[in-house]
Image (cartoon, grey):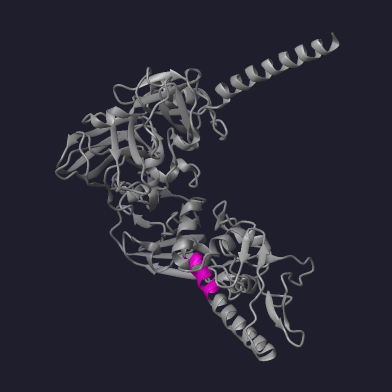
Amino acid sequence: MESKKIWLMIGIIAIVAVILAVTLGLVFGLQTDDTSSNNDVLDDKISQDAEFPNGSYIKSVDNFASGPVEAAPKNLSADDLSSFGVRVEDSSFVAETGRKHFFYIWLPPMDTRRSKRDTSDAQDGLAIRFGNAQNLNVVPVALADVPQSGVRKITGGVGSGTLYEIQARMPESLCQQAGVSSCTTVNWTPYRTTGTSASAGSGNALAVSCGSQCDTDPNSACATSCSTCDAGGTVDGADTPVTRRYNVGTTSGSFKFYYKTFNIKDRVAVIYENHIIHDTGCVGEEQTVTVTFSGQSSEVRVDVEPNCAGTTGTAWNFRLACPEACANGESRVRLMNGGREITSGGVVYISKDAETPSLAAYYCNNNQRIDWQLKLDAFSHTTGKVFCTETTLTSQKNPWTSILSSSGIRGGRATLTWTDAAGVTGSITFSIAGTQPPTAEIRNLIVTASGNLWYPPYVAEHESGLRQFVSGQPLISSDNGVGIFQLTNPVPTCEQVWSWKANVHAGVQWLNAKQRDANQWMQRQRQQALAEMGRNVPVPDRTEANCQFSDGTTRTINDAVAMKMFNGASGGNYAAWDNGKGKWKFNPMNDLPKPFNYVNRVCQLVR
């Protein structure tokens, strides 16, 4: 009797376990490993109010079972998209209110045969889930065969799958939700739906831009659209949406706006305080127009929606000129960074592309001689190491434009002083700070500059976390190491301190020099081994964390020697022939007060 009860209890437990497993599978099978949105209120707002292509529909995640992993969409980098002929830029990945946003979903090839339960349900689809929203926005794949549907199928790029472009207009009310910040990150996850199953890909970050961006954190994902009128030059693009924001330095006035959309039609909208103040419509033309604005903000936004007539293969460009700096008749000095006036205590930024900030000084409504002087203070570390010497620039031109063009890339404290013909003098003291570029851009430049060397990105990551700036100031360690590669000896130049690109090129150049030294060292060690043993003696394989160093491979012991040399090789080179003992010896540890294995630390970052 007791055994029957035991078996009955086991049976009940087994049934409950199965039910629980199925339930969890249905509930969590459609979840991603990504964290929830920074502001969950936007998840449902975008899902419900964004305008997806006609024929799309909303369906609860509860209506889908978890689909096969091999069918899940895959993430593509900007380089991967370019292999499909899709040209994107950073602002293309930011959601702007009222502007179309393009989502790119790549589907791997899969067996098109359906199970019996799938044949009676809806057609195949692509779907997007925003954060923790209860619903999926499902877009039937068949819409890609409908002209001007807002869904485009693109083939011929990486792999053998298919890239889909889905257009969705972001709701105007996106930024009216309580608690939404100026730049809020929403996670979106792509799905492949087949009948009643859905296969989830990896989550992606979608930055949602609300309000002014150019007077906030320059490292914000939404600030990527910020540019400088006049000095920002002509913006050009192709088949993906682009946004530019300009601080025009005043809350009212007029500016010249030039655009060219060539033969394939595009739409360009100029927006001020969330209202369109100039709309080209869907046109293929070249025009220069005068745009007038007035309000409380000094930021103007330009949105481009390419191929507005449902075409592809477009090209376009535009340019926004700053309002006249001396338009109001006042007789005073104005220091301008594009359209933004710089006053004492202000900050101008070296761009994320390592470009000198645009500066121009105007003595408004004064036609007499003006003596200008810009003093750039010396820049040094607290230990007394001087990286940038004091520099003085002068001019008698009015206006004095492109002030910093001859100074090279440098930052720090600056003082503009002027004296007019009547002896009236004044000054403006301000700061020049750096902008930390996206990690992906840093990594890409290191890989490109490194050529055949595989380890420089990991060395840089270990040295600095791929950081050049912290809060606008160069990253300088206690031993005077500077920037991404922590350049120390020789003392980095002023440009290597303030230009992340110069820092990368110098770091890679130094690693290449150490690789040459390592190759020569190991050649001598192998010759010593040959002389002592009368034969070539292979170096034993060595493993450091995620690195395997083996003769005859792309990662040899020479690389380990070079890495340790880059760190100073205290305690001896990583590998050497042990004369008189007939064997190789290894010196992975340095001889610092707290010894550590530099090569191992770098190799822990290898993926």
- Residue 273 % position (x, y): 36, 31
- Residue 294 % position (x, y): 32, 33
Image side of residue 332 versus residue 468, left or right: left
- Residue 267 % position (x, y): 23, 36
Asked if the stretch drawn in magenta spans residue 602, the answer is no
Which quadrant would the N terminus be assigned to in this image? top right
Q: Quadrant of residue 474?
A: bottom right
Image side of residue 202 versus residue 573, left or right: left
Image side of residue 101 versus residue 31, left or right: left
Q: Is residue 427 visible?
A: no
Q: Is 494 or 369 nearer to us in this picture?
A: 494
Q: Is 347 or 186 nearer to us in this picture?
A: 186
Establish if 273 lies above or below 438. Answer: above
Q: Quadrant of residue 208?
A: top left
Instruction: Tell which residue pokes out farthest to the top in this image.
Output: 1
Establish if 334 lies above or below 419. Answer: above
The magenta-colored residue range is 502-512
Q: Is residue 236 visible?
A: yes
Main SS class of the magenta portion in the image:
helix
Asked if the stretch drawn in magenta spans residue 506, the answer is yes
Which residue corresponds to the image point at 37% horizontal and 28% vertical from the top-left? 170
Q: Is 216 or 480 nearer to us in this picture?
A: 480
Establish if 364 lies above or below 583. Answer: above
Which quadrant would the C terminus be assigned to in this image? bottom right
